[in-house]
Amino acid sequence: MKKYIVCLLAITVAASTNIATAQQKDSSKTTDLFADLDKESKSADANVTDYTTATFKSTRIVNGHSIETIGKNNLDFRIAHRFGYVNSGVKNLFGLDEATMRIGLDYGLTNRLMIGLGRTTIDKELDAYVKYKLLRQSKGKCNMPISLTYFGGIYHYTKTTTEDINATNRTSYVNQLLIARKFNDAISFQLSPTWVHLNMVDLTKEDNDLFSLGISGRVKISKRVAITGDYYHQFNKLEGRTNSLSLGFDIETGGHVFQLHLTNSIGMNERHFITNTTGDWGDGGIRFGFNITRLFVLKKSAGSRSSL
Amino acid sequence: MKKILTITAICFATTFRVDAQDITLKTKSATIKFFSNTPLEKIEGINKQVTALLNEKNGQFAFLLLQKGFKFDNSLLEDHFNENYMESSKFPKADFKGNITNIAAINFSKDGTYPANVEGMLTIHGVSKKIIEKGTVEVKAGKVTAQSIFKIKVKDFGIKGEYIGDKIANEVETTVICKFD
């Protein structure tokens, strides 16, 4: 009999403690849901990585590449125009009479990997490149102070001259590490250490490997307008060449970016403007130019109702 | 004695029942889509990382999202959305805090689709506005999905830009789908 009473007592104790805790559980669950949401909000700040976007508005700053790449499945059609020297006077309409052009296509394979193709009228040069975002500036869960993008290009000019230069000698390569930081909504700054390898140079005293450092920046002066600058300082250069210095003015509209600029370079691909510039800002050896780009979406995400 | 101990142990073990019905539903992967439809352009942005909470007992309902979580097919458009319209660096988040006013009419233990009346404060771009909308709560095989489609007047939230009115609709169709865990 005693045994059974003890058992019964045990069961009642067990049951009542359970009911008590269940009641406790219930009341603790009716705490304010909105307070829970605020907690989620704060934890998101620490647990989610906020990647910096739009350090630069375009994949080019003025002449040189920025750390930006094109979004996945997006195709950027880009036309760059460069005119003659402003100091060639009014008869030459300050250079507008001579126009050179690069036409190119840039494509985003992923959100971090981009490829591009282009052809410039000067020297009838073809260029192809790959660009990959190695590091992205971010804050929150992962703090990264800079964005780092690798750029690798191959250049081949097809214009034949009186000299019979073989295909290999008409080829060159450019490797760059683009390092940038967006300081705030208005100001971004980039350093671009560059190595250009020319398969053939004109003079024996010239180096085939040319090293330079690009210094670029942009300042946004309104929601859609920015001032940009690009300077490539060469540590060793070809005979008679100058360093490329460009100033730009970017205007954005719905799907286009217009970039107007003044530069001493005629080249519109990296190999040309970095190592083959001969103009001098000091004596008006500058040119007006502009880039127009238009972004197309080649593949829409499933079920998307977008028309763009 | 041994017998008593074993029986007591079994009693304790079996009475620690797991509370089968958790009354706060949560998800961190709710979806919010917005669709701007004009004759000139159709723009759709989708955010698949919305945090949503629903209290089955008192009907409290809330969701929270990061503006940068909205993805667009066109990367330039996505930049414009964040830089020019939503000013995401100043207002990184948007949220809703409100109630399903007819929560008593929803039977969470019976499969079915129940109409829901939602009321509360929607905060976008730093501006809070009271909204009263309708939606549905679907209960299926123990899983709850709350959804609603309603319109948001862009300018009500202080969002400015020269394309609002022509390339961007004044009223944007917003779809909220919360599939709770």
Image (cartoon, coloured by chain):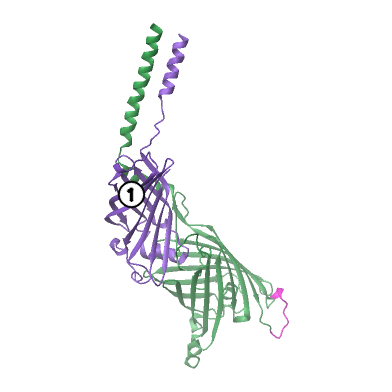
Horizontal relation, residue A16 to residue A50: left or right:
left
For the point 40% across and 42% down, the residue is: B111
Horizontal relation, residue A151 to residue A41: left or right:
right
Q: Is residue B107 above or below residue A132?
A: above
Colour chain A is painted in: green
Residue A290 seen in the current view? yes
Instruction: Determine which residue is flagged by label 1.
Output: B115
Q: Residues within 10 Å of mark 1 (few under 14, many from 20)?
A: some
Q: Work out whether residue A180 or residue A304 is closer to the camera in this orientation and state it.
A: A304
Horizontal relation, residue B66 to residue B129: left or right:
right
Q: Is residue B55 above or below residue A180?
A: above
Q: Which residues are magenta?
A: A161-169
| Residue A131 spot, x, y in % from top left | 57, 64
Q: Amino acid at mark 1?
A: Pro
For the point 48% across and 63% down, the residue is: B73
| Residue B64 spot, x, y in % from top left | 36, 50
Q: Work out whether residue B112 or residue A149 is closer to the camera in this orientation and state it.
A: B112
> Overall secondary structure of the magenta stretch?
loop
For the point 38% across and 40% down, the residue is: B110
Say whether residue A167 is magenta.
yes
Colour chain B is painted in: purple
Say whether residue A194 is magenta.
no
Q: Work out whether residue A257 or residue B43 is closer to the camera in this orientation and state it.
A: B43
Extreme-left residue of the structure: B130
| Residue A32 spot, x, y in % from top left | 30, 41
Residue A196 seen in the current view? no
| Residue B69 spot, x, y in % from top left | 43, 56
